[in-house]
């Protein structure tokens, strides 16, 4: 499998103000790549981010580029993950796992300081929050400390299917109902696996209480720290123009 990091000046040349510094491929598929924002040499921390989209193939990482750029302007390195959105489980979790492992392995080669490597924050929005929680639940007990900061995460796949939430997005993603393949759900479902997240992972969710896409009640009953943003909707937590963005950024990076 070829893995490479390439500069992509054509994005900057296109006039976008959210062009990444470079792109890193962690697999052979065109969708297996990471966009990296910020200066590796001066970064104070490393943020690995997984975009959402309720597991629907139509939503790619492009909508998260303003977030990545805004976080990088705070002095951190941001690695924004794209993944194979067609095919459902287990591809998404497999890709997120491979991407995070690849980014962590590449940080020294990118010139990231040991301090910034050790100051690792992993975040994801909506379905991306589900994926990073599931990823963390498969980590071994031993290893470096990680700050996990899910943003408006999908945390209970079984309740999502039972309630036909998101127009059946989770059932489409899983491809089967839990009563027909419970093992698949027990590999991917954050609520079922919460106790398996090792103690070295500090989980703190951030969720708006006006979220009409993923009800904040899911985060309230998930066994982890939670900060609610009064009045914030589903998109506010990733929108740099949102009045809630500064508070979200401080919670994410602080």
Image: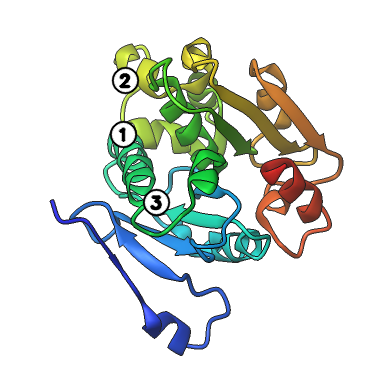
The residue under the point 72% across, 22% down is: 220
Q: Find the residue positioned furthest to the left.
A: 1
Task: Provide the residue designation for mark 3.
Answer: 107
- Judge whether residue 236 can be spotted in this image: yes
Q: Marks 2 and 1: CB-CB under 8 Å?
A: yes
Report how far apart the C-alphas of labels 2 and 3 lie in the structure.
32 Å
88 or 121: which is nearer to us?
121
**In x, y percent, where is residue 179?**
36, 11
Q: Earlier in the sequence, mark 1 or mark 3?
A: 1
Task: Provide the residue designation for mark 1.
Answer: 89
The residue under the point 84% across, 57% down is: 243
Report how far apart the C-alphas of labels 1 and 3 lie in the structure.
28 Å
Crowd around label 3: few <14 · some 14–19 · many ≥20 (10 Å): some
Q: Earlier in the sequence, mark 2 or mark 3?
A: 3
Give the side of residue 22 with respect to residue 41, left or right: left
- Judge whether residue 153 can be spotted in this image: no
142 or 98: which is nearer to us?
142
């Amino acid at each position: 499998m070829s893995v490479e990091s390439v500069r992509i000046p054509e994005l900057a040349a296109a006039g976008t103000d959210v062009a990444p510094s470079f792109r890193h491929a962690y697999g052979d598929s065109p969708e297996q790549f990471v966009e990296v924002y910020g200066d590796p040499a001066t970064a104070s921390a490393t943020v690995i981010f997984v975009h959402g989209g309720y597991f629907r193939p139509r939503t790619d990482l492009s909508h998260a580029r303003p977030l990545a750029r805004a976080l990088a302007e705070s002095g951190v390195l941001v690695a924004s993950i794209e993944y194979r959105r067609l095919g459902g489980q287990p591809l998404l979790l497999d890709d997120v796992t491979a991407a995070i492992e690849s980014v962590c392995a590449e940080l020294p080669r990118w010139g990231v300081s040991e301090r910034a490597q050790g100051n690792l924050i992993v975040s994801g929005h909506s379905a991306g929050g589900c994926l990073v929680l599931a990823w963390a639940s498969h980590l071994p007990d031993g290893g470096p400390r990680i700050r996990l900061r899910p943003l408006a995460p999908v945390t209970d796949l079984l309740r999502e299917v039972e309630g036909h939430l998101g127009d059946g997005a989770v059932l489409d993603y899983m491809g089967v109902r839990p009563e027909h393949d419970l093992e698949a759900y027990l590999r991917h479902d954050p609520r079922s696996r919460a106790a398996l997240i090792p103690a070295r992972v500090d989980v703190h969710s951030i969720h708006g209480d006006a979220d009409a896409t993923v009800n904040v009640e899911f985060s309230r009953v998930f066994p982890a720290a939670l900060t609610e943003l009064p009045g914030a909707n589903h998109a506010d937590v990733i929108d740099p123009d949102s009045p809630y963005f500064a508070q979200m950024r401080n919670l994410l990076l602080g």
